[in-house]
Image (cartoon, rainbow, N blue to C red):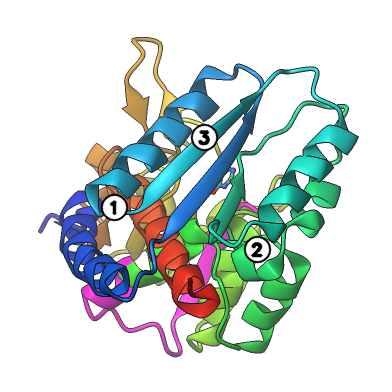
Amino acid sequence: MSAEVISGTELAKDIRTELKKEVKVLNEQNINPHLTVIIVGDDPASHSYVKGKKKASAEIGISSEIINLPEDTSETYLLEKVNELNNNINVHGILVQLPLPKQINEQKIIEAISPKKDVDGFHPVNVGNMILGNDTFLSCTPYGIITMLKSKDIEITGKHAVVIGRSNIVGKPVGQLLLNESATVTYCHSKTKDLSKHTLDADILVVAIGKEHVIKAEHVKKDAVVIDVGVNRTKEGKLTGDVDFESVKEVASYITPVPKGVGPMTITMLLKNTIKAAKQIGK
Ligand code: GUN
């Protein structure tokens, strides 16, 4: 039997309907959730992501501003900009789109953002709170993945979750959130020996490699839950995942597609975090 496809688009739509209502209630209290996004340089993929964030914000009534800065922006200038936004009481969420040009130390910028406005959940204070299981801003892609699993009542407790990829944005935090849900977690990465040995033992397999169709049916245990975080462009320019969807769906019990899988959920969690920030900061 073929796997059930978890539609990120459909789940995102349901959640955004609820978030829109929350924004309305806040508006009645004179709180107008506002997200400011800074983008440095001309990377087309980053610009496309940022456009998506602005559009999704507008659809649920969150106002947003995009600050476009040139590729040669200095670290000092960007730090000043972040500081200005930290002190602006009308700004609830601050997001600096990554990657940044090489003259700017990304970690320094992330640490300059007020943890109270860090809707990406990248600040060490928020990362620390996530590890401790405290209420905090969870980084959006991992938060979206957990939300997708829960939407289908997929059991996480006691399951073997295998995460491929160890980035600060996806791999590390998603493994931590799965651990917080009482999974037994294995992290795999580019230096892992015998990747198949691990993937074939996974009840939940999260794939964040960044390479087209690396994971095929022969790497997946029967009835595993497969989450594809990949965003790759084929030679023809089509969006595709790290998982060979067509073959893996014949083995898995649940699978997320690309596009229309994790991507729309990431943006939805950003909206959710922005509303959370607005509630906490207030007017
Ligand atoms: N670049 C790719 N994904 C992300 C994200 O979730 N947040 C930010 N700030 N930059 C990114």
| Image x and y of residue 110, in percent | 75, 53
Residue type indicated by callout 3: Ile
Circle 3 residues within 10 Å: few <14, some 14–19, many ≥20: some
| Image x and y of residue 54, in percent | 38, 39
Residue for badge 2? 172
Residue for badge 3? 66
Q: Secondary structure at mark 3?
A: strand
Q: 175 or 201, which is in the foreground?
A: 175
Q: Residue furthest left?
A: 1
**Ligand 1 falls in quadrant:** top right
In this rendering, which labeled residue sits more in front, label 2 or label 3? 3
In the drawing, does residue 66 fall left or right of residue 99? left
| Camera sees residue 253 | no
In this rendering, which labeled residue sits more in front, label 3 or label 1? 3
**What separation in Å lies between label 1 and label 2 (alpha carbons)?**
20 Å
Q: Residue at x 53, y 66 (%)?
A: 162
Q: Are marks 3 and 1 in contact (CB under 8 Å)?
A: no
Look at the image and give the residue range highlighted in magenta.
148-168
Residue for badge 1? 256
Q: Is mark 2 within 8 Å of ligand 1?
A: no
Circle 1 residues within 10 Å: few <14, some 14–19, many ≥20: many
Q: Earlier in the sequence, mark 3 or mark 1?
A: 3
Q: Secondary structure at mark 2?
A: helix
Q: Residue at x 80, y 17 (%)?
A: 72
Q: Is residue 15 magenta?
A: no
Q: Residue at x 55, y 86 (%)?
A: 135
